[in-house]
Image (tube, rainbow, N blue to C red):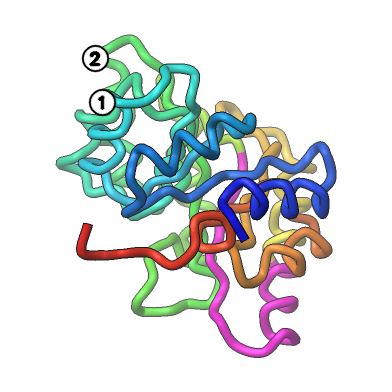
Amino acid sequence: MSIEENVKMIRNTIEKDVTLIAVSKTKPVEEIKKVYDIGIRDFGENKVQELIDKYDKLPKDIKWHLIGHLQRNKVKYIVGKVHLIQSLDSIRLLQEIDKHYSANNEIANTLIQINIGREESKTGVLLEKLDELLQQCENCNNVKVKGLMAIVPQATEESCRCYFKKMKDIFEDLKKKSFKNIQMDILSMGMSGDYSMALQEGSNMIRVGQGIFGKRNYNN
């Protein structure tokens, strides 16, 4: 199927209140424009440099989501260019974001990424450190937390559902509490291979790359 057909198929299977992010990492500007032209405005990138390159070449009404690990020394490059940082995962990164956004009088909208499967190969805050990170978020002037993000371990359907359910429980528990600078509006979970399951378990934002663009070419 074509890129346009892929997008239409996904749109037909998700609710209107679900945000579809087209994950465009490694994909050329021409292919991104095809997705843009049929109405998608949310795009996700893993690397700061690639996001910045595309930011300068594509329409300014695109909402860019940084979904990959954000190195502290790269924060200064994304100020004012990223709609949502989905990979806030440490106090040190939080402080760096707050510093650079404060200096530019900008607000950083973020999601806290949780390493729900405790995978050594994945970034994300561990659950036992979540409360400390939340407390520090309350002390910030220029960082707003809008919800949570997770990448669940790829295994059986049963285990995937278990992790999605756990994320939803954490999300709902935090929603009941009152924080400064923190709202639980977005639960970003589900990718090309598992977004249907994620939606069934309560996700309201999905990140789809190969399901839209096809396989990635990491040589680009």
Residue at (37, 14) in percent of width and height? 106
117 over 206 or under it: above or below: below
Farthest front residue in view = 1
- SS at badge 2: helix
User: Tag 2: Cα neighbours inside 10 Å, few (<14), some, or many (≥20)?
Assistant: few
Residue 44 screen position, x and y as percent: 45, 44
Q: Residue 132 vs residue 52: left or right?
A: right
Q: Residue 135 vs residue 6: left or right?
A: left
Residue type, numbered disc 1: Lys
- SS at badge 1: helix
**Quarter placement of the C terminus:** bottom left
Q: Which residue is mark 1?
A: 99
68 over 74 or under it: above or below: below
Residue type, numbered disc 2: Ala
Q: Which residue is mark 2?
A: 103
Residue 133 screen position, x and y as percent: 45, 48
211 over 33 or under it: above or below: below
Count how many numbered circles sit on residues in the image. Answer: 2
Dot 2 and dot 1 residues touching (CB under 8 Å):
yes
Residue at (57, 44) in percent of width and height? 21
